[in-house]
Image (cartoon, rainbow, N blue to C red):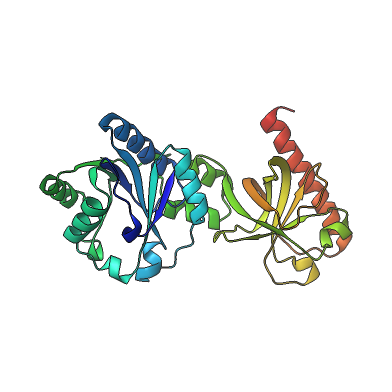
Amino acid sequence: MQVLEGLSHFPSFSRPTAVAIGNFDGLHLGHQKILRFLVERAKKSRVHSLVLTFSPHPEKVLGQRSVAMIQTLSQRLAGIKEHGVQAVLVTAFDRTFSSLSSREFVQKVIVSACQAREVVVGENFRFGRNRAGDIKDLHRLGSRFGFVVHAIPAVRHDGQIVSSSFIRLLLAEGKIEKANVFLGRPYEIEGRVIKGAARGKSLGFPTTNILTANEIVPEGVFVTEAGIQGQTYPSVTNIGTRPTFGEDKLQIESFLFNFQGNVYRKKIRLHFLKKLRAERKFVSAPALINQIQRDISAAKDYFSRAYGE
């Protein structure tokens, strides 16, 4: 998959494109529906499949509200690639870009830059300065400039629209299993293994300490799967401040089952499967050890049920 940054670096394709436009943060079930449609339409129309996405998130630039991203940009791009999209254009969303009128956005971005013959968006898509343009405007401008618009209906689960904003709320509340349903896969953070204080080792449970660029890191104790050096390990992950030891800095510590080796500075991915409990302060180290043993037992029971072992 070709990854292009900025409109000025966008190449001239030998054929027109079908372009899907959006933030695609989380690549949830609704996004997946859009990308599947995009790839199918591009093949049928014999055009290039292209995703136009933005970094940073428009809300971060416009300052209307704080937005914690579900994914890093690299995670987002990897997920888009998995859907068979041929190219992604990552456009910097800044004040200049946000000042484009609806018509300018269509002329300069959709038509001139993307060479779009087909445009795929969610049914609530808005565009242009102050989000003034809507789907009706896009259809009208499409007729004027020669592209077809496909507005994809939202996906619903249990009556709730699947959206990035709702998934962010679920993750913030620690409702991992429900968030995973809306995502269509386990929530994931990625990072590198760093040196810790070796408290886990001193308690008899050596942990892998992780530094991540992910903006949403749910706190608590979770059943997880850790991917490292091409292998996947069942694990229990604690995210919190370790109040039993009087600390206040957020730490990510994962205890990998049946793992031995030095993975310092190695890349690691954590898939969150189930929340076991909230982090809490224990009266003593033995009390904490007792709870860790129960957490590990609960995680093993989870994997045994999940994989029938």
Is residue 147 visible in the rendered image? The answer is yes
Is residue 64 visible in the rendered image? The answer is no
Name the spot of residue 306 as percent of width and height, x first: 67, 32
In the rendered view, does 21 fall on the left or right side of 28?
left
Farthest residue to the left: give it: 144
Say above or below: 288 vs 308.
Answer: below
Q: Quadrant of residue 120?
A: top left
Farthest residue to the top: give it: 308
Say above or below: 221 vs 47.
Answer: below
Q: Quadrant of residue 209?
A: bottom right
Residue at image position (75%, 65%) is 242
Looking at the rendered image, the quarter that the N terminus falls into is top left
In the rendered view, does 109 fall on the left or right side of 174?
left
Pick whichever, 297 or 8, lies toward us. 8
Residue at image position (70%, 37%) is 302
Looking at the rendered image, the quarter that the C terminus falls into is top right
Pick whichever, 129 or 239, lies toward us. 129
Residue at image position (42%, 46%) is 2
In the rendered view, does 135 fall on the left or right side of 253?
left
Name the spot of residue 238 as percent of width and height, x first: 71, 56
Name the spot of residue 216 as percent of width and height, x first: 55, 59
Residue at image position (79%, 66%) is 244
In the rendered view, does 169 fall on the left or right side of 274?
left
Name the spot of residue 101 as percent of width and height, x first: 19, 63
Instruction: Count all numbered tags in the image, as a single digit.
Output: 0
Q: Quadrant of residue 128?
A: bottom left
